Amino acid sequence: MVEIRAYAAAAPGRCLEPMSHRIGEMGPDEVEINVSHCGICHSDLSMLDNDWGIAAYPFVPGHEIIGTVAAVGPQARGLKVGQRVGVGWSASSCLSCGECLSGRHHLCAHVQGTIVGRFGGFADRVRVQWTWARPLPEAVDPAKAGPLLCGGITVFTPLFEYDVSPTARVGVIGIGGLGHLALQFANKWGCEVHAFTSSEQKHSEARQLGAHFVHTTASPEGLKKLAGSLDLIISTINVPVDAPALLNVLAPRGRLHVVGAVLKPLEVPAFGLITGQKSVSGSPTGSPAAIDRMLAFCARHGIEPVTENYPMSQANEALERLRAGQARYRIVLESDWS
Ligand SMILES: [Zn+2]
Ligand SMILES: [Zn+2]
């Protein structure tokens, strides 16, 4: 029996409080990780508030975990005790379905979320299936890396999955936790990068993060000028987008890709798709292999999340800052269990 200490909410929307619980023997394909850092993602808030109706209580948030491997089950592969790893949204998949066997484990029907029916990384340790604990390259700063494991891979996947060309023009809507990473990725990918933000204050920061052009989202005139020009638009925001206007901004065969978890339906006009053979798509996080590629890409190009770091004991304050929309751009908790 091992005792795990964590910060848990007893009911939807409640403050986190310290909790300890005993867990049994590790599964043969699991690894146990001593958590050093854990990023906070908007999905942690959605789960804490049970917005999606799938949270269980007590609820322990945290799915942007960085730590070191403390123990390895007999069937775990490729990991050693002491190795630094990261864990994102997924903690386990079946490894035997067509998607898993094709390397698309994140699309497995049996994939288990790190904070869905399990305790997440606002804790001193977590256990996950070895597949989902990805080795962190030396060149990536563990104090900043957590947000790459969920926010980062979410916006890296469309570039990776659709073989985006370095000559492509890529738009990123929303310069926040996800968008500020999408700008860096698209820039280093070699693309012409367009940032769309509703905040005038973020224009110069968006340029520093890699945008070649910055546009004000709410300006219909500005969007009209861009008609037929972008090959890919990644929408990272949590409010509905003006799909007809954005489809008009796309070049022929262009794609509007949605990663922001909006509950309202997206209104897509058929002729906006038909004319110019355009697509609307979406994706969740990414596969273990895609995470590895992303981490190597970050190491090579010096890409890192812009973070505000808090001790884990101040998780409630950090969550409130995220809830108020004040985080620039991602919050990371540092383990300070005594
Ligand atoms: Zn997330
Ligand atoms: Zn599977």
Image (tube, grey):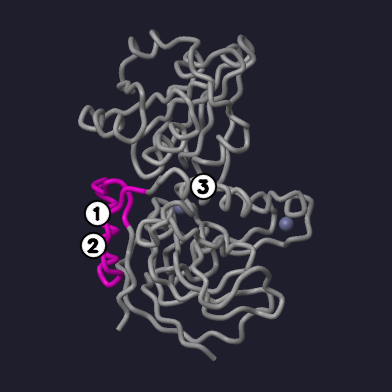
Q: Quadrant of the N terminus?
A: bottom right
Mark 1–mark 2 Cα distance, whole angstroms, equals 6 Å
> Badge 3 is on which residue?
153
Q: Is mark 1 within 8 Å of ligand 1?
A: no
Tell me the mark number nearer the camera, choosing from 1 and 3: 3
Amino acid type at circle 2 is Glu
Task: Pick the residue in front: 266 or 254.
Answer: 254
Q: Amino acid at mark 3?
A: Ile
Q: Which residues are magenta?
A: 305-331
Question: Ligand 2 quadrant?
Answer: bottom right
Q: CA distance from mark 1 to mark 3?
A: 23 Å
Residue at the spot 48% in from the left edge and 46% down from the top edge = 300
Q: Residue at x 56, y 51 (%)?
A: 291
Q: Quadrant of residue 128?
A: bottom right
Please name the amino acid that badge 1 sits on.
Arg
| Residue position for label 2 | 317
Quarter occupied by the C terminus? bottom left
- Name the residue tied to disc 1: 321
Secondary structure beneath label 1: helix
Q: CA distance from mark 3 to mark 2?
A: 26 Å
Q: Earlier in the sequence, mark 1 or mark 3?
A: 3
Q: Is mark 2 within 8 Å of ligand 1?
A: no
Of the pair 17 and 252, the residue shown nearer to us = 252
